[in-house]
């Protein structure tokens, strides 16, 4: 449900525009605004900073809706000087009360067992139903989630566990910060096993739009897992660093970062200013990503099963979970193949399911989803142009002269970076390339690991 995010960011964007124009018009209107309160494009723009105590060894924790990663340097080793581990951001609570995390949780859910599997947790961190701009996001999450959700007295969303999690089937409640901490703890354990020593300090990555409550919830998740959070870095900045934009961009140059993961999408215009990377424009969609592509395939085959067998598998939670897992595998395979066979053994009542799916059919089914990605890019490009106009007016007001070449090149995108598992889809790559008149996107890093890698380089190069 994009409306909530639109309203939240729309209000912030409108305030930015109003403040800028008030500053421009203040001499004529008689308003007295101290020079120090004017929006300084360098002072307010800087995001390229990470701080933590000198001499402290830190790891990077990148908590995602679909996958989460931990990375760090290995002191004293010559052949391998860094490590990185990634796991699915899934937690499964079995009937006997055991919590499975990562691959074990996803495999258990894919087998179609009757257990509660929680995923898509990042987008809900720190949200509250009492906040008008967040209610729509929480409500859509409740409608979409295959697990039971509710709210606590503070109106924060929770997972409600029934089977095997309480005495005599009593309901047990877990906050999303608690669930996220289980994922972080699993990552921490992997890092400690590899290093052979405890890991204590972490820098976390956060989306550009994370406010105080969401960022604090992410920090609490790391703290509950036994990590002291010493700093946070914006995901678009981490991606820009991973791709070397500090040296690749000219002063004032712009790069477009398109980040489409399993559950969420965001697009940023990253700019280099006075040697520092900053986010000039940004927009996110809380429900746009691989899950949406999977859902279109699932809906297609649900209707096919209904026609062929007279069975509505939407009424069978286990059958639906099996079908969804098979559809996700098919989507990934179609990134490198023109046709796949979607197969599920014993989908229901002992009946095996096997149907072909072509790449062209997949693209047809997801035409509307692809359109949403393009609309997100268009919105960010318009926002960036608005901000550039405002910045230029402010500079002119202050008597700053821009040379003719800078005016001609200002606002142009010199590099496109695609990040996130869903950007592996060939049609999405083509659409981005076509939007920018044939410019080839940069995808040289592994899609799910670029954020953690960039944050690691960024953290250690900023001290």
Image (tube, rainbow, N blue to C red):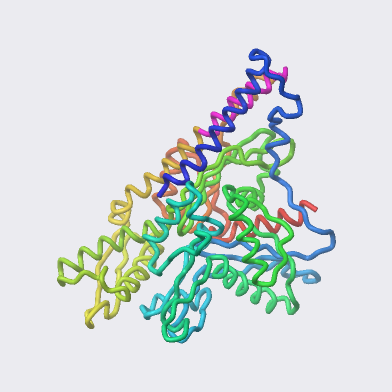
* Magenta segment: 383-401
Corner quadrant of residue 318: bottom left
- Which x, y percent locates residue 260? 48, 53
Q: Residue at x 15, y 69 (%)?
A: 308
- Which x, y percent locates residue 342? 30, 69
Left or right: residue 305 versus residue 274 is: left
Q: Is residue 148 above or below residue 371?
A: below
The answer to whether residue 316 is seen in the rendering is: yes
- Which x, y percent locates residue 77? 77, 71
Q: Nearer the viewer, residue 63 or 352?
A: 63
Q: Residue at x 44, y 48 (%)?
A: 429
The residue at the far top in this view is: 28
Corner quadrant of residue 75: bottom right
The answer to whether residue 336 is seen in the rendering is: no
Q: Nearer the viewer, residue 244 or 41?
A: 41
- Which x, y percent locates residue 390? 60, 25
Secondary structure mostly seen in the magenta stretch: helix
Left or right: residue 253 versus residue 366 is: right
Query: Does 412 appear in magenta?
Result: no
Q: Nearer the viewer, residue 222 or 278?
A: 222
The residue at the far front in this view is: 153
Q: Is residue 369 above or below residue 274?
A: below
Number of marks: 0
Q: Is residue 195 above or below residue 29?
A: below
Q: Is residue 302 above or below residue 373?
A: below
Query: Does 385 appear in magenta?
Result: yes
Left or right: residue 453 versus residue 268 is: right
Q: Nearer the viewer, residue 374 or 120?
A: 120
Q: Residue at x 74, y 76 (%)?
A: 198
């Amino acid at each position: 449900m994009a409306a909530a995010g639109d309203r939240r960011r729309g209000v912030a964007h409108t305030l930015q525009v109003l403040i800028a124009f008030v500053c421009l018009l203040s001499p004529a209107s008689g308003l007295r605004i101290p020079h120090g309160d004017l929006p300084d494009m360098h002072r307010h723009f800087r995001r390229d900073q990470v701080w933590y105590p000198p001499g402290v060894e830190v790891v990077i924790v990148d908590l995602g809706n679909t996958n989460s990663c931990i990375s760090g340097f290995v002191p004293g080793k010559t052949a391998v000087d860094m490590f990185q581990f990634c796991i699915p951001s899934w937690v499964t609570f079995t009937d006997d009360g055991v919590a499975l995390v990562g691959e074990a949780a996803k495999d258990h859910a894919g087998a179609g067992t009757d257990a509660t599997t929680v995923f898509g947790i990042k987008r809900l961190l720190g949200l509250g139903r009492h906040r008008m701009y967040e209610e729509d996001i929480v409500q859509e999450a409740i409608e979409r989630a295959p697990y039971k959700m509710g709210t606590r007295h503070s109106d924060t969303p929770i997972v409600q566990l029934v089977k095997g999690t309480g005495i005599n089937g009593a309901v047990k409640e877990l906050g999303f910060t608690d669930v996220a901490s289980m994922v972080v703890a699993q990552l921490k354990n992997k890092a400690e096993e590899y290093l052979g020593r405890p890991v204590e300090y972490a820098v976390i990555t956060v989306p550009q739009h994370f406010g105080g409550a969401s960022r604090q919830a992410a920090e609490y998740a790391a703290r509950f897992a036994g990590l002291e959070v010493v700093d946070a870095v914006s995901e678009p900045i981490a991606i820009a660093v991973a791709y070397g934009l500090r040296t690749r961009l000219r002063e004032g140059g712009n790069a477009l970062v398109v980040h489409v993961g399993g559950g969420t999408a965001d697009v940023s215009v990253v700019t280099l200013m006075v040697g520092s990377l900053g986010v000039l424009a940004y927009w996110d969609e809380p429900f746009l990503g691989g899950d949406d592509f999977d859902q279109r395939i699932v809906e297609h085959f649900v209707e096919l099963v209904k026609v062929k067998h007279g069975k509505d598998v939407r009424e069978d939670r286990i059958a639906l979970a099996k079908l969804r897992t098979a559809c996700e595998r098919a989507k990934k395979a179609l990134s490198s193949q023109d046709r796949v066979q979607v197969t599920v053994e014993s989908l229901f009542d002992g009946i095996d399911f096997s149907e072909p799916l072509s790449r062209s059919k997949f693209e047809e089914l997801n035409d509307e989803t692809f359109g949403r990605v393009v609309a997100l890019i268009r919105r960010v490009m318009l926002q960036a142009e608005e901000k550039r106009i405002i910045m230029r007016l402010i500079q002119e007001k202050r008597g700053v002269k821009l040379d003719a070449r800078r005016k001609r090149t200002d606002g142009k995108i010199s590099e496109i970076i695609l990040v996130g598992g869903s950007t592996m889809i060939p049609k999405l790559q083509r659409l981005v390339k076509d939007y920018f008149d044939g410019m080839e996107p940069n995808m040289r890093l592994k899609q799910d690991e670029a954020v953690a890698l960039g944050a690691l380089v960024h953290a250690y190069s900023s001290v």
